[in-house]
Amino acid sequence: MTELQYAFRLIAVARGKMIFGFFLACLAALSGFGLLFLSGWLIAAAAAAGLGGIVTRNLFNLFLPAAGVRFFATARILTRYGERLVTHDAVLESVRVLRARVFERLIPRSTLLTDHRSGDVLGRLVSDTEIVGQFPINALMPFGVAAICGTVSVVIISVFSLQAGLLLALALLLSGMAVPVLVGRKVDNDMERLAGLGDNFRADLVEAVQCAGDITLCGAAVRTVEALNATQSLFGKTQLRSLAWSHASRQAGAFIAALAVAGVLMIGARALQSGALSAPELPMLILGALAAMEFVSGVVPARQALARARVSIRRLMTLCEAPLPVAEAANVWEGADFTRLVMRDVRFGYAGSRKIVLEDCSLSIHAGERVGIVGPSGAGKSSLIRLLLRLEEYQSGSIHWGGANLKQLDTQALSTQISVLSQDFHLFQGSVRRNLLLARSDATDEDMWAALSSACVFEEVRLMENGLDTLVGEHGMRLSGGQARRLAVAQIILRRPRWVILDEPTEGLPPEKGRDLIAFLLAALPQATVLCITHRPEPLEFMRRVLRLEDGRLHEREGLP
């Protein structure tokens, strides 16, 4: 699939509006041509009639051509307004749908995004989708308008003077094809370079803002600013070179247009002397040629827009068409009663790494059990969670939820039955209410307060200035560590999952606070099956069975390690 085919598939939702907008753009361009073409004849004919005496003035029909001029003027205004209205609506719809589709494609590939810097991914999701959504209007429509309207103008002028028509055709080809091809060869590399520099600058800037405190404490603020300035300077120089070529192409187009008009004037003058043309037809052809050259004035910017769009399409394809980390699931629910988790002889290692994380790993957990897993750092405890949630694909062995193979279930289906409290849980910028609604979109205020009460954070939220509408800040920075973690627990309580997986749930908390946190959660979800991965002893006090993960295998342990 080519880049353009891929882009058209993504924005097919607005295809009808774009075609209609293209039709209106052609009508607007042709109306402008007709306006100048007919105005040239009308002004010259009226002047000739005025010099011809009273009889000629009385015989001259001013009203019919004047009506034509008014018609073209009105049509030009209406079609131009309609074209802008339709194409802007099409672009907005395309960008809206495109961003949703790109995000939808990124969700199952979220584990691959760690290969990209966060500012880079954000730039692609925002800037590249906007460029791709606009490219049919900015990059393709000017070529189509120039081709259709240019052909029509050449045919019309050739009716009056074949030589003038051929000269105009040559000028249109030079200005609309030769110049864009030459400029395109120069700007393609610049567009690719600008995209890369823009990515680096955005990513560096995002990291600098997020880590401003640490950068200042390390005394690296000056170096960071200098690095940002260097990247911005290089970006500006590349952009200036691209703008210089764009300006040169416009000047070349204006020069070709001037030569074309001068050539039509010379051809028309000889035809007038020979009697092949009437006096009013000469200015008509001159103004018509001038109007026709306007058709190709947007071709060079369109060629640059096409170069930008192709770069953006390739960048989106790199993200959205990357191989899935796990095979697509059939989402077969028969037998997936989630009453039991069984792993048999599972072997797993990350792609691109020779290290085997899990080797012949087996595990059996029945509904209602509370199982703890301990082990040294790097033993594969977090990798085990990723396998159970089907974020990674194991190489051999089997994992079954109830009677269903894990490979028959997708992550979205698993998330309806399983909740995870990880050590690096995320709270979104927004209110307490918004973060709770992410866990359960139909939750009422009563449900939220009940969940907050079960998580023992009810009083803190109630005493906040805006209650549920209190802003938690980015990553929950306005809350204390304990409050943020208990809010994450409230999210799990709201969802009422059948299985709860805890990944270092008490990390960073004092022992008593960590013990209280687990107690609150288990008291609120007494029927839930719990799998707790930790290296601290407090959570294990609540577990009925403890396993140790070591050398890629799980070993049964009695009591605490």
Image (tube, grey):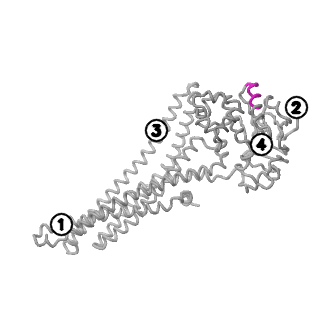
Whether tag 3 and tag 2 are in contact, CB under 8 A, the answer is no
Does residue 64 appear left or right of residue 307 in this picture?
A: left
Report the disc number at residue 106: none
Mark 2 belongs to which amino acid?
Answer: Gly
Does residue 146 appear left or right of residue 133 in this picture?
A: left
Looking at the rendered structure, the secondary structure element under dot 3 is helix
How far is the residue under mark 1 from the one under mark 4? 89 Å
Looking at the rendered structure, the secondary structure element under dot 2 is loop
Looking at the rendered structure, the secondary structure element under dot 1 is helix
Of mark 2 and mark 1, the one earlier in the sequence is 1
Task: Give the x, y percent position of residue 539.
Answer: 79, 31
How far is the residue under mark 2 from the one under mark 4? 22 Å
Q: Nearer the viewer, residue 244 or 351?
A: 351
User: What crowding class fits label 2: few (fewer than 14 Cα within 10 Å), some (14-19), or many (20 or more)?
Assistant: few
> Where are the magenta residues, as a range?
510-518
Q: Which residue is mark 3?
A: 233
Viewer-nearest of discs 3 and 2: 2
Of mark 3 and mark 1, the one earlier in the sequence is 1
Of mark 2 and mark 4, the one earlier in the sequence is 4
Quadrant of the rendered image containing residue 253: bottom left
Mark 4 belongs to which amino acid?
Answer: Trp
Quadrant of the rendered image containing residue 123: top right
Does residue 477 appear left or right of residue 511 in this picture?
A: left
Task: Give the x, y percent position of residue 514.
Answer: 75, 28
Report the disc number at residue 499: 4
